Amino acid sequence: QVQLVESGGGLVQAGGSLRLSCAASGSIYSINDMGWYRQAPGNQRELVATITAGSSTNYRDSVKGRFTISRDNAKNTVSLQMNSLKAEDTAVYYCYAIVLTAGFRRLEVWGQGTLVTVSS
């Protein structure tokens, strides 16, 4: 099995910064795309940022210029540096990864979520 464990959420004032991290572990052969989604109360889960194995990135428009996604392929980790946070960034943030297991099964794996609260 493969699991993702997130860390780094918390409470921050508007304009502040937080860094989220996510580590994948288990029976992993390789990881393709990794990324972050978020879900605010009453809203659907939405894409925040993605990064390919070759480090090509994609961001939702509202976080461009403020958030930076990065990954360490050797450590099977992905991070999200969030700067200039706004109240509307408040949500539960979920890490995800497209994993090829050691048995060559393709899995979409999700973390448990970490809460980010931005106070205005």
Image (tube, grey):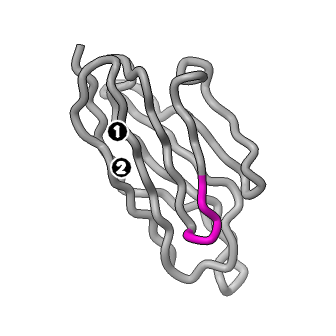
Which of pointers 2 and 1 lies earlier in the amino acid sequence?
A: 1
Q: Which region of the structure is painted magenta?
A: 71-75
The quadrant the C terminus occupies is top left
Q: Which residue is mark 1?
A: 92
Secondary structure at numbered mark 2: loop
Residue at image point 56% right, 83% down = 27
Q: CA distance from mark 2 to mark 1?
A: 6 Å
Secondary structure at numbered mark 1: strand
Q: Nearer the viewer, residue 55 or 44?
A: 55
Q: Which residue is mark 2?
A: 113
Q: Is 72 within the magenta?
A: yes
Residue at image point 61% right, 78% down = 28
The crowding category of the residue bearing disc 2, from other C-alpha atoms within 10 Å (few below 14, some 14 to 19, many at least 20), is many
Measured as percent of width and height from the top left, residue 63 is found at 54, 23
Measured as percent of width and height from the top left, residue 93 is found at 40, 41
Up-down relation of residue 30 to residue 57 (above or below)? below
Answer whether labels 2 and 1 touch (C-beta < 8 Å): yes
Quadrant of the rendered image containing residue 100? bottom right
Residue at image point 48% right, 57% down = 110
Residue type, mark 2 in image: Gly
Quadrant of the rendered image containing residue 82? top left
